[in-house]
Image: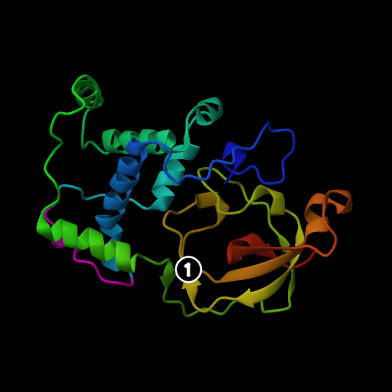
């Protein structure tokens, strides 16, 4: 959610696409399916709230893969490349790059397999998941995962507290929308427990589990009175690392 990856509130960026179909082309469903299977087999699920037997699954996939992995891969793209490709093309690039970087497949082998199916689109695909893998995938779709983690600390802010949003350095990824940086807000809810993000964002401040807050903002404080509808409130769920006392 930085640079080209989160453009909320910016002007003069060209026409907005209003495509309502989730999948515009048939192949996009397969990319979504690959991503879902990777999440269902992710090594980190041994520590998820719903306990999954990931370490005993009959699979060669032994890496961690979450929504954060997908987003980090997309955010590593050169900005002009990012705008050139469609949504699921970015997914395909990130997933393919991950498998090459992790050593599951060589780049040349991937190219050869792509060329093969391009020339023979009706050729049989690899075997479908075994029964245990299919059971794991279905269970993951039903039960999912959660960033909620045990926490013994005390929240630094309470409902009703005025806060100012920080401006942390975003090196690889950030969960903080750019238009909220430095803006004043008010805590309207402190969520129970604490939450971790699926990757450590380093200088951005997200690592160990921490409280998450619902913060309310006056739209005029964000975009100015002349560009905001009167009596409009914007809400955002924010990690504690992004909140500071009023200046």
User: Closest to the observer: 42 or 247?
Assistant: 42
Residue at x 49% of width, y 77% of height: 193
Quadrant of the image containing the C terminus: bottom right
Tag 1's secondary structure?
Answer: strand
Dominant secondary structure of the residues highlighted in magenta in the image? loop
Extent of the magenta region: 49-58
Tell which residue pokes out farthest to the right in this image: 226
Is 212 placed left or right of 143 in the picture? right
Can I make out residue 88 in this image? Answer: yes
Is 200 placed left or right of 66 in the picture? right
Which quadrant holds residue 126? top left
| 205 to 162, vertically: above or below | above
Is 182 placed left or right of 121 in the picture? right
Rendering coords of residue 162 (x, y %): 76, 71
User: Closest to the observer: 224 or 228?
Assistant: 228
| 85 to 36, vertically: above or below | above
Residue at x 17% of width, y 28% of height: 122
Rendering coords of residue 227 (x, y %): 84, 49
Residue at x 45% of width, y 54% of height: 200
Structural crowding at the residue carrying mark 1, measured as other residues with C-alpha within 10 Å and reported as few (<14), some (14–19) or many (≥20)? many
Which quadrant holds residue 139? bottom left
Can I make out residue 156 in this image? Answer: no
| 205 to 22, vertically: above or below | below
Residue at x 33% of width, y 36% of height: 27
Rendering coords of residue 152 (x, y %): 47, 80
Which quadrant holds residue 49? bottom left
- Let me know if residue 52 is in the magenta part: yes
Residue designated by label 1: 195
Rendering coords of residue 150 (x, y %): 41, 76
Is 46 placed left or right of 235 in the picture? left
- Let me know if residue 105 is in the magenta part: no
């Amino acid at each position: 959610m930085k640079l080209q990856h989160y453009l909320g509130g910016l002007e003069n960026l060209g026409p907005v696409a209003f495509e309502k179909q989730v999948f515009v082309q048939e192949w996009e469903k397969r990319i979504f399916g690959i991503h879902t299977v990777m999440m269902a087999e992710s090594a980190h699920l041994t520590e998820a709230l719903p306990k999954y037997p990931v370490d005993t699954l009959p699979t060669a996939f032994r890496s961690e893969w979450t929504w954060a992995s997908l987003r980090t891969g997309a955010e590593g793209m050169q900005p002009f490349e990012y705008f050139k490709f469609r949504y699921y093309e970015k997914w395909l690039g990130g997933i393919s790059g991950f498998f090459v970087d992790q050593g599951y497949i060589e780049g040349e082998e991937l190219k050869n397999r792509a060329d093969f199916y391009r020339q023979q689109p009706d050729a049989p695909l690899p075997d479908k998941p075994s029964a245990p893998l299919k059971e794991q995938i279905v269970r993951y779709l039903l039960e999912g995962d959660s960033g909620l983690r045990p926490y013994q600390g005390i929240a630094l802010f309470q409902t009703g507290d005025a806060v100012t949003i920080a401006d942390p350095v975003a090196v690889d990824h950030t969960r903080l929308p750019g238009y909220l940086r430095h803006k004043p807000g008010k805590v309207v809810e402190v969520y129970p427990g604490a939450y971790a993000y699926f990757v450590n964002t380093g200088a951005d401040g997200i690592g160990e589990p921490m409280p998450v807050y619902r913060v309310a903002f006056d739209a005029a404080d964000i975009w100015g009175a002349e560009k905001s509808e009167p009596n409009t409130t914007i809400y955002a769920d924010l990690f504690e690392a992004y909140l500071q006392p009023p200046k």
